[in-house]
């Protein structure tokens, strides 16, 4: 019996202990469930908040990028380079251009495609300011980054910090607009071309008379032409058409680093049957890259139209060009005339703000080329082309197009941020301009220099 009672008590004790344990565990479980429920709610709320924040942030950034794209397009420059910097391919650009009629539609598609690219890279659909900054920085889209910095990032408590060395940033006058941002350079160049009063086509066509007409090559052989910094080919194609009047076939090597501009040049060629006798050899590279590889081809004509301000080393580029010239060949360069108000603007800016060696900057004029030729006793002929620019836009305080033109003219990126340089440039422009109605007309004088490599000369 005792033993029976004992085991009954044990069973009860064990049951009650089991029940007791179960009761305590339910309480704890309920508390734990509640705690977890709160945690999930908080997490869900904070995630939802984060997603919304990212969405809002992205919306502001997208609006600002749309402004930037529109501004660049208004300046007459393609939005392509920025889209490419954001990861789109040239096929994407071709499809977007074909399918979207207006710039607004095109920009929306660029952004949509870009989000898709980011998603594929493992970012969420709600890409944020940091991913935009990283992507643009990786692709050296400094113009767009600066625009975002000025227009939206600070409001979001973010900032793009330009960590490049000062000489690359081009804060110095003439310090390298093109080195600072190729994209800004293109936008500035587009605005500058847009300010031309003289019809741009008549300017291009004026090169018809400048192309040398005494070029000689072996009978039956191609006339060999090397064009450096050809851009979208308008001037080069005028030169080629002029050469085709005397030569039945031409081999033309094109050196141009910008894919965008080269594509435009190719499109121009495709649409022009008068160039069908030209064999094109496209080289998408800089003059520096091109001259690094040893080349045996000798050219009857080498030309660089408005390029020599942009190359790294004027002397080395001229030496390389001269070396690839066939005996009896011609070298033709076009540059801002040192005696023109534009050339004098550069000398003035250099005197007031420059440091170091002017020839290492973009402030190079036709005078520097003549000096190079004179020092080597090379004979040449020169001619000038006169055009005019309407620079009224530069005098409107907050005009982005005006600022871009001034960047191009002063060869200084974001010159509006440097009030002393800007005001010196504006004063010089005003002094050398004529006011016609609401236009401020400033002369643009280009000097074209054609040098001849005499047969046996060793320079
Ligand atoms: C001012 S545009 C002149 C374009 C064309 N020659 C014309 O007169 O219409 C200068 C061109 O040189 C190209 N360029 C810039 N830096 C260069 C370099 N280091 N080597 C070769 N081309 C360069 C630019 O992409 C641009 O197309």
Image: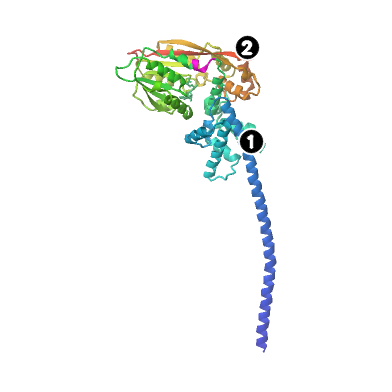
> Where in the figure is residue 120, as x and y percent of width and height?
52, 44
Stretch in magenta? 198-202
Which of the two marks, 1 or 2, is nearer to us in this view?
A: 2
Query: Quick one: SS at disc 1?
Result: helix
Placement of 178 over or under 329, stated as above or below = below
> Residue 28's spot in the image, x, y percent?
68, 65
> What residue do we see at 60% from left, 43% from top?
126
When asked about the image quadrant of residue 104, the answer is top right
Q: In this figure, which residue is indicated by the disc labeled 1?
A: 153
Q: Which mark is residue 435?
A: 2
The answer to whether marks 1 and 2 mark residues whose Cβ atoms lie closer than 8 Å is: no
- Disc 1/disc 2 C-alpha distance (Å): 40 Å
Instruction: Using the image, tell me which numbered label, if any, was put on residue 106.
Output: none
Graded by Cα atoms within 10 Å as few (under 14), some (14 to 19) or many (20 or more), the crowding at tag 2 reads some
Q: Quadrant of residue 320?
A: top left
Number of numbered labels in the structure image:
2
Predominant SS of the magenta segment:
helix
């Amino acid at each position: 019996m005792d033993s029976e009672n004992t085991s009954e008590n044990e069973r009860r004790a064990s049951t009650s202990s089991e029940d007791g344990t179960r009761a305590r565990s339910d309480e704890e479980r309920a508390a734990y469930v509640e705690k977890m429920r709160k945690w999930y709610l908080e997490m869900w709320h904070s995630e939802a908040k984060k997603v919304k924040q990212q969405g809002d942030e992205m919306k502001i950034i997208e609006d600002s990028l749309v402004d930037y794209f529109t501004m660049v397009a208004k300046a007459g420059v393609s939005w392509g380079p920025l889209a490419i910097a954001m990861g789109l391919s040239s096929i994407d650009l071709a499809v977007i251009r074909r399918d979207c009629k207006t710039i607004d539609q095109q920009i929306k598609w660029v952004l949509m495609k870009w989000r898709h690219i980011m998603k594929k890279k493992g970012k969420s659909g709600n890409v944020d300011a940091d991913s935009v900054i990283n992507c643009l920085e990786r692709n050296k889209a400094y113009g767009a980054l600066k625009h975002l910095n000025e227009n939206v990032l600070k409001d979001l408590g973010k900032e793009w910090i330009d960590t490049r060395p000062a000489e690359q940033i081009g804060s110095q006058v003439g310090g390298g607009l093109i080195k600072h941002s190729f994209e800004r350079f293109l936008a500035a160049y587009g605005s500058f071309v847009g300010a031309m009063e003289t019809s741009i086509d008549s300017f291009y066509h004026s090169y018809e008379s400048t192309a040398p007409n005494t070029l000689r090559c072996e009978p039956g052989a191609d006339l060999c032409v090397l064009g450096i910094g050809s851009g979208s080919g308008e001037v080069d194609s005028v030169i080629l058409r002029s050469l085709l009047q005397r030569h039945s076939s031409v081999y033309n090597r094109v050196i141009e680093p910008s894919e965008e501009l080269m594509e435009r040049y190719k499109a121009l060629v495709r649409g022009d049957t008068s160039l069908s006798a030209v064999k094109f050899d496209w080289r998408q590279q800089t003059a520096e890259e091109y001259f690094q590889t040893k080349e045996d081809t000798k050219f009857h004509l080498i030309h660089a139209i408005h390029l020599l301000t942009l190359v790294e080393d004027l002397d080395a580029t001229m030496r390389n060009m001269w070396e690839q010239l066939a005996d009896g060949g011609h070298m033709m360069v076009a540059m801002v005339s040192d005696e023109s108000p534009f050339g004098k603007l550069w000398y003035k800016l250099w005197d007031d703000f420059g440091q170091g060696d002017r020839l290492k900057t973009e402030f190079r004029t036709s005078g520097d080329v003549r000096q190079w030729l004179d020092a080597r006793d090379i004979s040449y002929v020169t001619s000038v082309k006169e055009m005019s620019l309407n620079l009224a836009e530069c005098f409107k305080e907050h005009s982005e197009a005006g600022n871009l033109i001034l960047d191009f003219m002063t060869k200084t990126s974001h010159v509006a941020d440097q009030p002393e340089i800007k005001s010196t440039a504006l004063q010089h422009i005003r002094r050398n301009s004529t006011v016609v109605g609401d236009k401020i007309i400033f002369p643009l004088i280009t000097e074209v220099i054609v040098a001849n490599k005499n047969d046996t000369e060793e320079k």
